[in-house]
Image: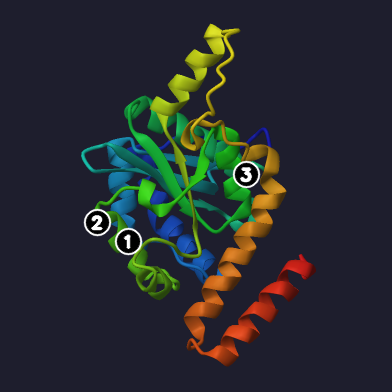
């Protein structure tokens, strides 16, 4: 990242960037062919007033990037939402710095909350993994209806509805502070006692970061399959076509 770019907590003085931020959010979603929850400039300004957002700016005052925090279910869950970087500064490493900063802000303001995110971006998944997030099923996320209503502006919302909100094009990722505390305690104790009993699956340390390439292939396959099953009617002939397409997809990747 350009060392001159400043990544910091946003303040009320940054409200002048709100219109630019929301416009770029909409344009970016349109270009990618995916959607994010639409937010108005006033909503972004509120986040700045509340001290629940992070902004990146150049030395000359040019806006570079932004992200904000949302809390759900009486602050049991927290989402770092609306990550956006100006086109001229993409692939510069600034997105990673923004994610780090917003993660720190979330941990500071909501130390006991589970931090989660939904994304189709592999770069964001990798950043999340580095911060300690792990891929989870949608059932492990908030059940707050207000959060899920934000997906209505996404082009993939019909897929989400068809799957009864149990799956979609996005990958769900979660940082659980309670689980991380248990892991850290186990490391510090460094016991030499070896148990002969099998370790329950949910207690095994996941190896997402070490197998990111494999997960990338799985994610692409999931998205491909979801689109195929949603766009076409289910029939025996189509079922055969779907199986052939998936096999071709696997060999291609």
Q: Nearer the viewer, residue 87 or 165?
A: 165
Which residue is the site of mark 1?
150
Direction front: furthest residue: 196
Residue 156 coordinates in the image, percent (x, y): 45, 71
Residue 185 coordinates in the image, percent (x, y): 48, 14
Residue 126 shows which numbered tag?
3
Whether 160 is drawn above or below 200: the answer is: below
Q: What's the distance in space between the residues labelled 1 and 2, CA to CA?
A: 7 Å
Whether the residues at callouts 1 and 3 have beta carbons within 8 Å, the answer is no
Residue 195 coordinates in the image, percent (x, y): 55, 17
Residue sitting at 34 percent across and 38 percent down?
Answer: 52
**What is the count of numbered marks?**
3
Q: What's the distance in space between the residues labelled 1 and 3, CA to CA?
A: 24 Å
Q: What's the distance in space between the residues labelled 3 and 2, CA to CA?
A: 27 Å
Whether 1 is drawn above or below 138: the answer is: above
Is the residue marked by circle 1 packed among few (<14), some (14-19), or many (20+) residues within 10 Å? some
Residue sitting at 67 percent across and 46 percent down?
Answer: 212
Is the residue marked by circle 3 packed among few (<14), some (14-19), or many (20+) residues within 10 Å? some
Residue 107 coordinates in the image, percent (x, y): 40, 28
Q: Nearer the viewer, residue 51 or 142?
A: 142
Residue sitting at 46 percent across and 29 percent down?
Answer: 104
Query: In the picture provided, is 118 more to the left or to the right than 123?
Result: left
Label 3, secondary structure: give it: helix
Which residue is the site of mark 2?
146
Direction left: furthest residue: 74
Whether the residues at callouts 1 and 2 have beta carbons within 8 Å, the answer is yes
Is the residue marked by circle 2 packed among few (<14), some (14-19), or many (20+) residues within 10 Å? few
Closer to the chain start, of discs 3 and 2, is 3
């Amino acid at each position: 990242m350009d060392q001159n770019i400043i990544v910091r907590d946003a303040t009320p003085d940054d409200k002048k960037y709100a219109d630019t931020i929301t416009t770029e959010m909409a344009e970016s979603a349109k270009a990618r062919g995916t959607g994010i929850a639409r937010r108005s400039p006033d909503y972004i300004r509120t986040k700045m007033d509340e001290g629940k957002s992070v902004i990146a700016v150049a030395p000359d005052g040019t806006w570079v990037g932004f992200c904000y925090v949302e809390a759900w279910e009486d602050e049991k869950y927290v989402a770092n939402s609306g990550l956006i970087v100006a086109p001229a500064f993409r692939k510069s490493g600034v997105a990673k710095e923004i994610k780090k900063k917003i993660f720190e802000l979330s941990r500071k303001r909501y130390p006991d909350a589970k931090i989660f995110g939904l994304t189709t971006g592999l770069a964001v998944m990798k950043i999340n993994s580095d911060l300690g997030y792990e891929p989870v099923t949608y059932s492990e996320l908030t059940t707050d209806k207000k959060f899920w209503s934000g997906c209505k502006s996404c082009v993939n919302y019909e897929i989400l509805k068809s799957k009864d909100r149990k799956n979609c094009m996005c990958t769900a990722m979660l940082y659980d502070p309670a689980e991380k505390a248990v892991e850290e305690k186990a490391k510090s104790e460094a016991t030499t006692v070896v148990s002969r009993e099998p370790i329950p699956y949910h207690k095994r340390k996941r190896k997402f970061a070490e197998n990111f390439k494999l997960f990338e292939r799985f994610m692409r396959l999931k998205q491909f399959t979801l689109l195929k099953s949603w766009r076409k009617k289910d029939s025996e002939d189509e079922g055969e076509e779907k199986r052939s397409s998936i096999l071709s997809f696997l060999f291609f990747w």
